[in-house]
């Protein structure tokens, strides 16, 4: 995949800070700061060195501003979380490590490092009973990774296709949640509707290949899962 052009990176970061389900200012700011982070994940995954450096730098700036405003005296519901400030610092440390890896040309390592920030932010919201649309994207992503990691090995086992079908059922449910849980700002967006449909279609293709008992088609369908999700996550995740 070709690196993202500079103007596209900028438009994604500046224009895709879409509202989720949050009703508090801190969560809304964290979601706005999530936009350059999503671009950084995409850029490191596609081995776009310049785009990775720019987007991580922008993510660091946005996160540093959030720390400055909220770390010492967060508003509800985070005001009762004794680990709030520490978690913000952990995310900043992830960004710093990833930036160092990008400067060293270690883009796959930087991508893996950045994944930890998503988990830290998700856990921060979860323990404070905050749900945003990104949580549904993360749930799909986690199950997709299980399918991608376990799928090839399962196919080589007796009854492995049936075991994989069970996981695909869970993935299909989570794909449906991507549409069902979308806030109004996303549900009315034609680009979002097309992206969600593409994710669902990739899961349907995998299920159909398993029903057809075609190992080659299953492998091809597995390979087709990641791209539609990545595109949806980049713009709306």
Image (cartoon, grey):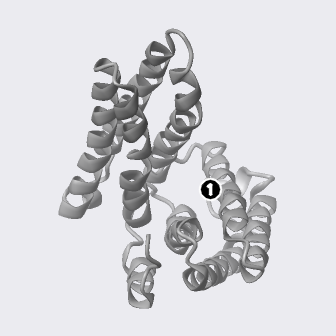
Which residue appears at 65% of the width and 75% of the height?
63
Q: Nearer the viewer, residue 185 or 96?
A: 96
When the figure is inspected, residue 182 is found, relative to residue 104, above or below; the finding is: above
Q: Quadrant of residue 192?
A: bottom left
Say which of 44 and 180 sits in front: 44
Crowd tier of the residue under label 1, counting other residues whose Cα lies within 10 Å: few below 14, some 14–19, many 20 or above? some
Q: Is residue 97 among the parts visible in the rendering?
A: yes
User: Whole-percent x and y of residue 145?
Assistant: 55, 41
**Total labels drawn:** 1
Q: Is residue 32 left or right of residue 44?
A: left
Residue 20 seen anywhere in this rendered image of the structure:
no
Residue located farthest toward the front when viewing the structure as drawn: 216
Which quadrant is the N terminus positioned in?
Answer: bottom left
Residue 170, x across and y down, in percent? 43, 26
Look at mark 1 in the image and give the residue it sits on. Answer: 118
Q: In the rendered view of the protein, which quadrant contains the C terminus?
A: bottom left
The percent position of residue 235, horizontal first and vertical second, equals 38, 66
Camera-side residue: 148 or 16? Answer: 148
Q: Residue at x 61, y 81 (%)?
A: 49
Q: Is residue 151 rendered to the left or right of residue 2?
A: right
The residue lying at 44 percent from left, 86 percent from top is 10
Query: In this picture, is 184 found above or below 176?
Result: below
Quadrant in the rendering for residue 53: bottom right
Farthest residue in the top direction? 159
């Amino acid at each position: 995949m070709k690196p993202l052009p500079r103007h596209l990176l900028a438009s994604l970061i500046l224009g895709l800070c879409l509202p989720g389900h949050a009703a508090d200012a801190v969560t809304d700011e964290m979601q706005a700061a999530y936009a350059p982070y999503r671009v950084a994940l995409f850029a490191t995954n596609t081995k776009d060195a310049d785009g990775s450096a720019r987007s991580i730098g922008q993510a660091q700036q946005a996160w540093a501003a959030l720390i400055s405003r909220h770390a010492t005296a967060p508003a509800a519901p985070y005001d009762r979380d004794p680990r709030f400030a520490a978690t913000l610092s952990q995310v900043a440390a992830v960004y710093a490590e990833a930036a160092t890896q990008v400067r060293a040309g270690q883009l796959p390592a930087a991508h893996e490092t950045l994944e930890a920030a998503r988990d830290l932010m998700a856990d921060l919201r979860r323990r404070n009973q905050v749900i945003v649309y990104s949580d549904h994207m993360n749930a799909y992503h986690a199950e997709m990774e299980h399918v991608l990691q376990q799928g090839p090995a399962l196919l080589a086992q007796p009854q492995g296709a049936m075991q994989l079908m069970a996981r695909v059922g869970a993935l299909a449910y989570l794909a449906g949640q991507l549409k069902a849980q979308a806030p109004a700002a996303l549900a009315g967006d034609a680009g979002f509707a097309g992206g969600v449909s593409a994710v669902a279609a990739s899961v349907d293709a995998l299920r159909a290949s398993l029903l057809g008992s075609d190992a080659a088609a299953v492998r091809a369908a597995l390979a087709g899962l990641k791209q539609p999700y990545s595109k949806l996550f980049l713009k709306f995740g």
